[in-house]
Amino acid sequence: MPTIPFTVRKIDSLKKPEAGRIDYWDEDLPGFGLRISSTGKRTWVAMYRTRDGLQRRLRIGTYPPLSLADARDQARDILRNVQKGKDPALERDANRTADTVKSLVDLYIERHAKPNKRSWKDDRRILYKDVVPAWGSRKAYSIRRRDVIALLDDVAKRGAIMANRTLEITRKMFSFAIERDILEAHPCIGVKKPGIARARERVLTTDEIRSVWKAMDGLKIIHAAHLKLRLITAQRGAEIRAMRWSDLDPALEKAEDICWWTIPPEFTKNGKGHRVPLTGLALDLLRQVRKAHQNPIWVFRVNNADGGETIWEHGNEVRVKSGVEFTPRDLRRTAATHMAGLGITRFNIARVLSHSDSSVTQVYDRHSYDPEKKAALEAWSKRLVEIIENKPPASNVFPIRA
């Protein structure tokens, strides 16, 4: 193996072999070499022996794209790591097969989010909206705290609360990677939330309710009914989207009074079953949906797949037509606030909303509160009709059962 002083002039003067390849080694840095093939290709290499006695040859780069000075610096780093007991060739092979951020996102969704979170689609949407476009092709281990902060700064330009959610989900994903021994360091440690989460306060006025309702009438009945039922029943959008015909009172078609919608525990946020009284306003909508929409199982799904993912798109259409700035979630809050304005107690409104109650009293209280929920939603339904028809309240007093 020829050993020569490595200088740019000397390297440029070396001839290619007639066949095969030849290696030259640096006099000043043992283990640093240049391989020249019969095609003229010149490749920097580092050769070393591991503590186990194995001889390794590690490719550094090609000359002249990689200069002599830069190649020598890289060779020094490699040989220095060898002295520390490391095997740079094995580490490089491991890096090539290490999980990319995109593969980690997919693994997190399939192995953690789907089995454990009802909101796994939100996780997937947020990760694919910002994290995958920014880091998708990068190795997961290469993400640093400064990368996380830079990403959150970009997201915060659209909204601090969304940046908070992105941090929350990204932090959980990297914690999942550490639990599975994919990563050793957590890049989100010490990263603070970009924004202060504040309770949502948007409540539609009577004029806004009227404008929004009229704009909803321009949608297909399945989309209009989905949004309107949020306002009529004050239930969560995900629970309405999961409504099945079997969850509804069989008397739905002919009933003139209240029918009941029973939400099973697997579809509720708090994991507890919930009964919702459906007033005439809600029943009319559901009958229209049944006539126009022929899925035998699901009320608001086009087929057996989830068809509710576009509800935000339809909500945006209503915003544009009505000129009212709101989100579909604001409809539930609006219903609850207007019920309070009718004199319905906060306790009974909480029963309508199916809010969790962890008090000691609740443990022993097995009363269904069906009469109270029925009275509350009947009163709200009457008032909602008056708002839609632009009529003053028939009375400020509504009969609420004790």
Image (cartoon, rainbow, N blue to C red):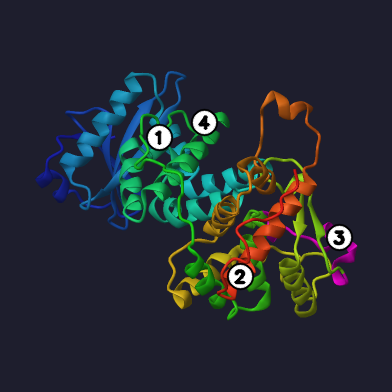
Question: Is 65 positioned to the left or the right of 176 in the image?
Answer: left
> Does the residue at mark 3 contact the one at mark 4 (Cβ under 8 Å)?
no
Q: How far, Cα to Cα, is label 2 from label 4?
A: 57 Å
- The percent position of residue 381, horizontal first and vertical second, equals 67, 63
* Residue 351, placed above or below residue 329: above
Label at residue 144 = none
- Image-quadrant location for residue 306: bottom right
Q: How far, Cα to Cα, is label 1 from label 4?
A: 12 Å
- SS label for mark 3: loop
Please rate how many residues cluster around mark 2, counting C-alpha atoms within 10 Å: few if below 14, some from 14 to 19, many from 20: some
Q: Nearer the viewer, mark 1 or mark 4?
A: 1
Q: Earlier in the sequence, mark 2 or mark 4?
A: 4
Q: Residue at x 36, y 34 (%)?
A: 191
> Does the residue at mark 3 contact the one at mark 1 (Cβ under 8 Å)?
no
Q: Earlier in the sequence, mark 3 or mark 2?
A: 3
Q: Nearer the viewer, mark 3 or mark 1?
A: 3
Magenta region: 239-254
Q: How far, Cα to Cα, is label 3 from label 1?
A: 49 Å
Label 1 is placed on what type of residue? Cys
- SS label for mark 4: helix
Residue ID for mark 4: 178
Q: Earlier in the sequence, mark 1 or mark 4?
A: 4
Residue ID for mark 3: 249
* Residue 70, placed above or below residue 232: above
Label 4 is placed on what type of residue? Ile
Label at residue 386 = 2
Instruction: Please indicate, yes or no, whether residue 21 appears anywhere in the rendered image.
Output: yes
Label 2 is placed on what type of residue? Glu
